[in-house]
Amino acid sequence: MRHRIIVPLALTAALLTACSSGTDEESSGNEEVRVSAAPSGASDTSETSGTSGDTGRQAGGSSRSGKPANNPVAQRYVDAVADEDVAALAAAFHEDAVLNEPGRTFQGRDAIREWAAAEVIGGRLTVLDDTPKRDGTTLLLRFAHRGESGDGFRARYEFTERDGLIGRLDLEYA
């Protein structure tokens, strides 16, 4: 019963926000507001995509897309991607952090910085769900590489914290 009430309210709020943000000149761009259902139990998220180089800004002009991560360490990563800030992304990791991607492992902040500069920065990341765990969180997200049209792909990023930073990040692609 709760979903029957929450979903229409979330949809209404997203549409009102999209319709009321900015002036007519700002709103007349090539942005399209999409409201998509989040995975089981999560609230709906709204995101926008433009037809010319938009990086996933939400209605209202924010550079964030989807829902925020509940975990501040994971949110630093999300913010760095949205801000296209490779230095901030690298700084979110512990100096000797490990990033595991299918078929590849990156050891240390410098290696992770190089990976992020080549493959992450400039892409669009949308948080769909956030599942806390004892020592971090797991984000279900959608990611589209720089210049990639469409919605990209779904992924699960498992963040393990150490000393207030990302100590390990395991990426799994759907």
Image (tube, helix red, strand yellow):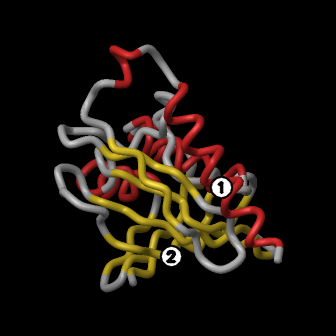
Q: Position of residue 45 (x, y in %)?
A: 57, 56
Question: Mark 2 is on which residue type?
Answer: Arg
Task: Tell me if residue 141 comes above or below residue 111 in the rendering.
Answer: below
Q: Which circle marks residue 139 in the picture?
A: none
Task: Report if residue 99 is visible in the image.
Answer: yes
- Which image quarter holds the N terminus? bottom right
* Left or right side of 20 for 121: left
Task: Report if residue 168 is visible in the image.
Answer: no
Question: Mark 1 is on which residue type?
Answer: Ala
How many C-alpha atoms fall within 10 Å of the one at disc 1: few (<14), some, or many (≥20)?
A: many
* Left or right side of 55 for 108: right
Q: Position of residue 74 (x, y in %)?
A: 62, 56
The part of the image, by quadrant, that contains residue 150 is bottom left
Q: Which circle marks residue 156 in the picture?
A: 2
**Residue for point 25% across, 35% down:** 30
Give the Cα separation between the discs numbered 1 and 2.
13 Å
How many C-alpha atoms fall within 10 Å of the one at disc 2: few (<14), some, or many (≥20)?
A: some
* Residue 145 vs residue 59, the one in the foreground: 59
The part of the image, by quadrant, that contains residue 104 is bottom left
Q: Position of residue 166 (x, y in %)?
A: 61, 59
**Residue for point 54% across, 26% down:** 20
Q: Position of residue 87 (x, y in %)?
A: 43, 37
- Which image quarter holds the C terminus? bottom left
**Residue for point 19% across, 57% down:** 148
- Mark nearer the N terminus (1 vs 2): 1
Task: Tell me if residue 41 comes above or below residue 124 in the rendering.
Answer: below
In the picture of the structure, the residue carrying the numbered disc 1 is: 69
Q: Secondary structure at mark 1?
A: loop
**Residue for point 44% across, 76% down:** 100
* Left or right side of 8 for 90: left
